[in-house]
Amino acid sequence: MYPLRRNRRLRTSEAIRSLVRETSITPNDFIVPLFVVEGKGIQEEIASMPNYYRFSLDLLVDEVRLLWKMGLKSVLLFVKVPDNLKDNKGTEALNKDGLMQRAIKTVKDAAPEMYVMTDVALDPYSSYGHDGIVENGKIINDATSEVLAQMSVSHAQAGADMVAPSDMMDGRILYIREALEENGFTDTGIMSYSAKYASAFYGPFRDALDSAPGFGDKKTYQMDPANRSEAIKESLMDIDEGADILMVKPGLCYLDIVRDLRNEIELPIAVYQVSGEYAMLKAAAEKGWLDHDAVMMEQVTAIKRAGADLIASYFAKDVVRTIS
Ligand code: PBG
């Protein structure tokens, strides 16, 4: 007697394993998040994100050129706004010469073909550290969406290719799409953080931008980690409102959501492998408890296998170094 099927036959060498491999990782899979600060000559490491940095505009140029050389073709920009420019309405977000607007131009000058995406939310600009305008301790939905729409137009005017609203206000994709169309930015895309969960994995990011909420938490706008069908509802609504790419965030804990969406919708799906996921692996690897590169590759492969087309990841450069 012998087994009729021997699945191990297709695992006998790297050659056959690579021939039957269902998921592969290339530089085209990645969006690189970049943190930008005011100043000159600044490349400062973020304490809770080892080997990840905030750049001033002059050094951002070198970083962007390096990314382009490595085959990484898109960046997602975040800015750290000085405290004295923060207010409740995100006024600084609309400044034509604001840090974000200058960062967009800087990236386009450094690497004209780099696809530039920008974070659209009020938290880095908000004196309350919330993603929306605050009134009586509440986050006001529609007034916030209007500001997000103006912010998106401002980013498009500065040269952004795609805006990425990360705030989770209801209806904001429609506000943004209409504002872009009305201002002639028919080709400016929207990557909607459509299923963004109220996650504890964002901690290191809030350190990076000094954007932790000053009171309360974000549970009245970001989704409850316990919910699944709500993610489909949110995503279908964002498609109707004009989103070009949807996003699930964070990554690893939410791959069931990615698969649900993949089975349900036709749009490209991005996953944000967030700061806490990055920090966890860096910390464990530093202790010698995990093999950094092997775990990293396993994670990004799993994200793609689940159904993601794109991954916004702080590991992007590490991945490209590993596979090339
Ligand atoms: C805020 C925003 C957050 C992230 C991206 N945009 C944090 C938050 O919602 O508090 C998190 C990214 C990460 O943790 O890497 N609009």
Image: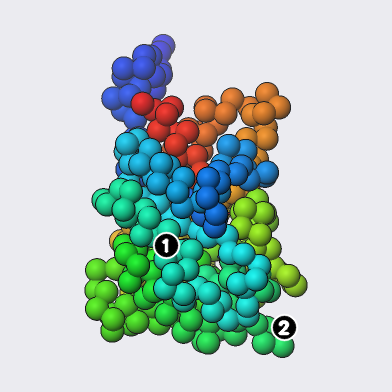
Residue 30 image-quadrant placement? top left
Whether ligand 1 has any atom under 8 Å from the Cβ at mark 2 is answered as no
Image quadrant holding the C terminus, namely: top left
Foreground residue among 287 and 15 = 287
Nearer to us: label 2 or label 1? 1
Count up the numbered dots: 2
Most extreme residue toward the top is 1
Colour mode?
Answer: rainbow
Residue picked out by circle 2: 137
Residue 315 seen in the figure: yes
| Disc 2 from disc 1: Cα separation | 32 Å
Q: Is residue 30 above or below residue 181?
A: above
Q: Identify the residue at image location x=34%, y=30%.
A: 21
**Percent position of residue 107, x then y:** 36, 53
Most extreme residue toward the right is 215
Q: Which amino acid does label 1 sit on?
A: Arg
**Percent position of residue 230, x then y:** 53, 70
Q: What residue type is labelled 2?
A: Gly
Residue 202 seen in the figure: no
Foreground residue among 276 and 122 = 122
Most extreme residue toward the front is 40
Q: Is residue 322 above or below residue 166?
A: above
Q: Identify the residue at image location x=55%, y=43%.
A: 43
Q: What element carries label 2?
A: loop
Q: Identify the residue at image location x=66%, y=67%.
A: 83
| Left or right, 193 with reference to 204 | left
| Left or right, 243 with reference to 43 | left
| Left or right, 119 with reference to 42 | left
Mark 1 nearby-residue class (10 Å; few <14, some 14–19, many ≥20): some
**Percent position of residue 234, x then y:** 47, 72
Q: Is mark 1 on a helix, strand or loop?
A: helix
Residue picked out by circle 1: 102
